[in-house]
Image (cartoon, helix red, strand yellow):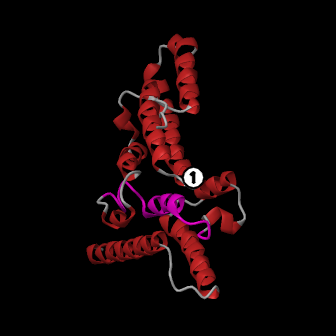
């Protein structure tokens, strides 16, 4: 049986860095409220990027998920000096919290996750599903010819869910066309679930648009 380490080395590095920063620099200042306001933004960004880069992994199976869950617990603790309460980090923390159980959710149950479209964006859920996809179903950044770093920068520049969904949709269309060209009629289960999520996202967006129009 493979022994799962409490957390990864990079989390330990973050813990040690924050501890050193707190004791050697931040503790020297009296303007703690001023510092906290700015440190909270850094902590929120760390949580956001953790979830993002977790979603960009490929071939993620149970052992890796368990390691990530352990990392998340330790990362949350490590960031505590950067805020009064970790819950003060708003939407970044909400995403971080709902993402941990989402890691272990059965693929077929993901479309009914109650957090989708709220604290868990559809694009984030679909990105994560690429970690369970077959090699033929390429990740969006691979299809675009980008590195993961370039893709992360693109996501930073494109906050709108509609833009992210459009890029993902093109990736799925490319996969379906490739399967069709090979004379195969069977599409992978992960693709089917992704398409269901895209449909749900479109329905949610349409409902919100109609509601907004009626309220105007």
In this rendering, the count of numbered labels is 1
- Note whether 26 is above or below 12 in the view shown: above
- Name the residue: 44% across, 30% down: 74
Looking at the rendered structure, the secondary structure element under dot 1 is loop
Q: In which quarter of the image is residue 177?
A: bottom right
Quadrant position of the C terminus in the picture: bottom left
- Name the residue: 47% across, 58% down: 124
Left/right placement of residue 31 relative to residue 140 reads left
The residue beneath circle 1 is 57
- Name the residue: 58% across, 32% down: 10
Residue 187 % position (x, y): 50, 78
Q: In which quarter of the image is residue 208?
A: bottom left
Residue 178 % position (x, y): 63, 81
Tell me, yes or no, whether the highlighted magenta stretch contains residue 121: yes
The residue stretch that appears in magenta: 115-137
Tell me, yes or no, whether the highlighted magenta stretch contains residue 10: no
Residue 81 % position (x, y): 44, 23
- Name the residue: 45% across, 20% down: 32
């Amino acid at each position: 049986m493979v022994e799962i380490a409490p957390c990864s080395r990079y989390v330990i590095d973050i813990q040690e860095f924050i501890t050193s920063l707190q004791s050697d620099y931040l503790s020297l200042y009296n303007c703690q409220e001023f510092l906290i306001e700015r440190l909270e933004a850094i902590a929120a960004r760390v949580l956001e990027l953790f979830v993002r880069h977790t979603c960009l992994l490929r071939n993620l199976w149970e052992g890796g998920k368990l390691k990530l869950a352990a990392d998340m617990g330790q990362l949350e603790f490590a960031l505590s000096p950067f805020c009064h309460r970790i819950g003060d980090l708003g939407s970044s923390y909400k995403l971080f919290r709902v993402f941990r159980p989402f890691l272990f959710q059965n693929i077929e149950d993901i479309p009914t996750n109650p957090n989708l479209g709220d604290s868990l964006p559809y694009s984030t859920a679909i990105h994560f599903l690429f970690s369970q996809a077959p090699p033929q179903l390429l990740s969006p950044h691979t299809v675009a010819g980008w590195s993961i770093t370039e893709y992360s920068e693109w996501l930073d520049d494109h906050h709108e869910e509609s833009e992210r969904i459009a890029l993902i949709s093109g990736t799925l269309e490319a996969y379906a066309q490739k399967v069709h060209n090979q004379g195969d009629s069977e599409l992978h289960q992960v693709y089917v679930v992704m398409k269901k999520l895209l449909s749900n996202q479109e329905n949610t967006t349409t409902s919100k648009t109609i509601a907004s129009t009626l309220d105007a």
